[in-house]
C-alpha cells in the first residue's frame, strides 16, 4: 500500500476539510473534516456507523478525495486497529470544541483510514 508523502500530509493536515467521493466518483462528494494521526489520514462520521456516506465507504472500499485543486484516488479502510486516542486528540486540537461530535464512541466506531492508491493504469486520476 502506498503511503502519503510528507508534503501531502502537511497539505491535508493544514486543510479544514476534504471532499470525499465514494466508489466510482459518479455521485457528488461529501465535505468532511479530517485529521492526520500516526502518519495516516482519518475521517469520522459524526452520526456513527449509520451515516449514509460511511456505509457507502464501507461497502465500496475505494473512492476519491479532494482538497482544493488536488485530488487522489484512495482506499477507504474500516475496522482493524485504529489509533483511537490519537485521532480523538487530533480532532480536538484541530477543531476545538466542535470536535466533541467526532471524539466519542459513536463516531470512533465510524472511523475511516484513507490511503492513496499508487498511480497506474488500473485506476487513472480523474482531475
Image (tube, rainbow, N blue to C red):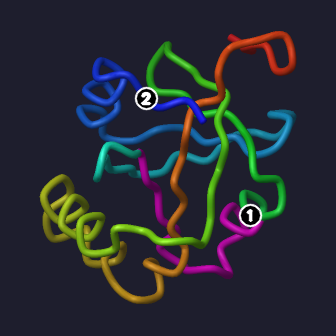
Residue 51 part of the magenta-drawn span: yes
Q: Is 30 above or below relative to 57? A: above
Q: Residues within 10 Å of mark 1 (few under 14, many from 20)?
A: some
Residue 84 part of the magenta-drawn span: no
Q: Which residue is mark 1?
A: 58
Extent of the magenta region? 41-55
Q: Report the front residue among 16 and 4.
A: 4
Query: Callout 1: helix, strand or loop?
Result: helix
Mark count: 2
State the quadrant of the C terminus.
Answer: top right
Q: Position of residue 16 (x, y in %)?
A: 30, 40
Residue displayed at 24% across by 66% down: 86
Upstream in the sequence, badge 2 or badge 1? 2
Residue displayed at 26% across by 70% down: 88
Q: Is 14 above or below relative to 108? A: above
Q: Is 69 above or below relative to 96? A: above
Label at residue 46 = none
> Separation of disc 2 and disc 1 at Cα?
21 Å
Q: Quadrant of residue 9?
A: top left
Q: Which residue is mark 2?
A: 4
Q: Is 27 above or below relative to 120? A: below
Q: Quadrant of residue 79?
A: bottom right
Residue displayed at 74% across by 39% down: 28
Q: Report the front residue among 19 and 79.
A: 79
Amino acid at each position: 500500500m502506498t503511503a502519503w508523502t510528507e508534503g501531502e500530509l502537511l497539505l491535508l493536515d493544514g486543510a479544514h476539510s476534504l471532499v470525499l467521493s465514494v466508489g466510482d466518483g459518479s455521485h457528488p462528494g461529501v465535505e468532511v473534516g479530517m485529521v492526520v494521526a500516526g502518519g495516516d489520514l482519518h475521517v469520522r462520521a459524526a452520526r456513527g456507523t449509520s451515516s449514509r456516506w460511511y456505509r457507502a465507504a464501507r461497502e465500496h472500499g475505494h473512492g476519491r478525495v479532494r482538497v482544493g485543486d488536488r485530488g487522489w484516488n484512495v482506499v477507504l479502510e474500516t475496522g482493524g486497529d485504529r489509533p483511537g486516542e490519537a485521532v480523538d486528540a487530533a480532532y480536538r486540537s484541530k477543531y476545538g470544541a466542535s470536535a466533541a461530535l467526532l471524539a466519542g464512541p459513536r463516531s470512533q466506531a465510524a472511523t475511516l483510514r484513507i490511503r492513496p492508491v499508487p498511480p497506474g493504469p488500473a485506476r487513472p486520476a480523474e482531475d
